Image (tube, rainbow, N blue to C red):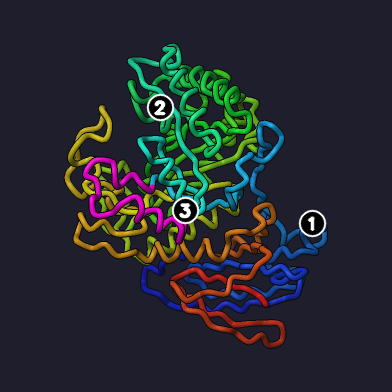
Amino acid sequence: MYKNQSGFTPIQIILSILVGVVVLGGIVGGVLYYSKQSNQQVQQGSCGDGVCGPAEKADLNLCPQDCEGQTVAPSAQAPSPTGQQPTNTEQINWDSPFGIFGPYETLSAQNPLKSVSKTDINSILKDIGVWVEEMPRGDNINEISKSGANIYSRIMCTGKTPPYTSDQKCKDSIRSTINQYKDTIKYWEFGTEPNGLTPPTGWKGYAKEYATDLKEAYTIVKEECPDCYVVFGGLGGVGVGATEMPGGAADFLKDALSAGAGSYFDVFEFKQHSANASDYKEIVTKLNIYSKIFSDNGVNINNKLIFIETATHDGSPNPKYNYSPGLKSQTQAQQATGLLKYYIYSISQGIDKIFWNLVYERHNFGSTGATRPDAPSIPEGSSVFDYYGLINNPDNDGDSSKKLAYYTYKKMVEVLDGSDWNNIQTIQEKDGIYIYKFTKNNKVTDYSTAFNTETKTVSGGKVTITLKDIPVFVEGN
């Protein structure tokens, strides 16, 4: 939800509820609405209403002005390497786009949170999580498996200079990790932020060598686990508008694909960090930039799955130390509505999985103990990662409460998980009004946790809903 800079002036939206639009064949449609400050009326059912309805979508010549720019954005579905779904049938909601990055990271990274255990985290994941990205360190994978979440993880090697796989120990390590977890984990990211980390942990300045290492890793993974997926290590990305800077993520991708990397991964991942709630469209801007690079190198991005790791913050991280001069202070409400916008807009544009950065905030991230060899320490409380997360870190300010973002995430999964992700309908994306329709078989009825609910009476095929500063889920009976 856009926050009105002058306040939270309510906006009255007139919604036309038509059979076949919200309720179709017994399938409940959950429709998300959010708006800028603007007095708009949305009325469906006739040509010129600004809505590309089902009949108009079926025949784009029926009312071209309504359907201009209105497209259904199905999730890109790359086939499993064996032509089958992954074999771990105990995992549920395999196609769910909802994920959490590094739920244990705050417990094990620099300045670890000691008052919370892995068991505590698992209880939270059972409450909100569907997918998690966790590292194969120590007992992490065995412990996270107890949460019931699907698991996505990483393989990587280090060395003096790339290609790291020239060392047999590197290849043996990859093979051993895959063998150990191949019945539990089916998605493996090779390295992470290869464009941003210098040797001995990354490939900054070595894109062609990353392509060489990726090919070796891909070969090993497929030999040991034919139904596993290999993920192009999430391209680092901070701030807004920096993707195409010289030597940045776009240049790295160009060089890697030109070196033949395109044939050796099933999933492409990139990241969006140090951004405000209002910057949610930057994710799709990046995707469009990367898509063109794929095309220029003869690779069809539609044959790849697309993952992202992202987050936005509450509080006041220091823009100077987060490579993002436009970074602003935000309230919990802004973080929560930003979370929903990041997810819904990205999903509607064909992104398959979104991993939200962290369950708990970090504490003095990057301040005491270098996060990487080439990064200097920064003042305490400066990093945006200290303000991420769905739950407050008591080591920061004594507060261990769940944020509004936690309840928003929980409700989002509750309402939308199990939707038909290949059939998301874009009703409108213009005039400050964004409307998307999701369909699922079972109606969600419990709204008591985080959102106020009420029943509206339909009169003459219309219902009036007043929108304030937060998005609204609308379901038809």
Q: Which residues are magenta?
A: 103-129
Q: Amino acid at mark 2?
A: Gly
Confirm whether the magenta stretch covers residue 246.
no
- Mark nearest the camera among 3 and 1 is 3
Residue lying at 43% horizontally and 55% vertically, measured from the top left: 125
Pointer 2 residue: 247
Give the CA distance from mark 2 to mark 3.
24 Å
The vertical placement of 328 against 402, above or below, is: above
Dot 3 surroundings within 10 Å: few (below 14), some, or many (20 or more)? Answer: many
Quarter of the C terminus within the rendering: bottom right
Residue 251 seen in the figure: no
Asked if residue 104 lies in the magenta stretch, the reply is: yes
93 left or right of 158? right
Counting from the top left corner in percent of width and height, residue 359 is at 37, 53
Q: Is residue 312 left or right of residue 292?
A: left
Residue 56 in the image, given as x and y percentages of width and height: 78, 62
- Look at mark 1 in the image and give the residue it sits on: 60
Query: In terms of sequence position, does the residue under pointer 2 or pointer 1 come before the other?
Result: 1
Q: Amino acid at mark 3?
A: Tyr
The residue to which callout 3 is attached is: 280
Contact between labelled residues 1 and 2, with CB atoms less than 8 Å apart: no
Front-lying residue, 424 or 435: 424
207 to 294, vertically: above or below: above
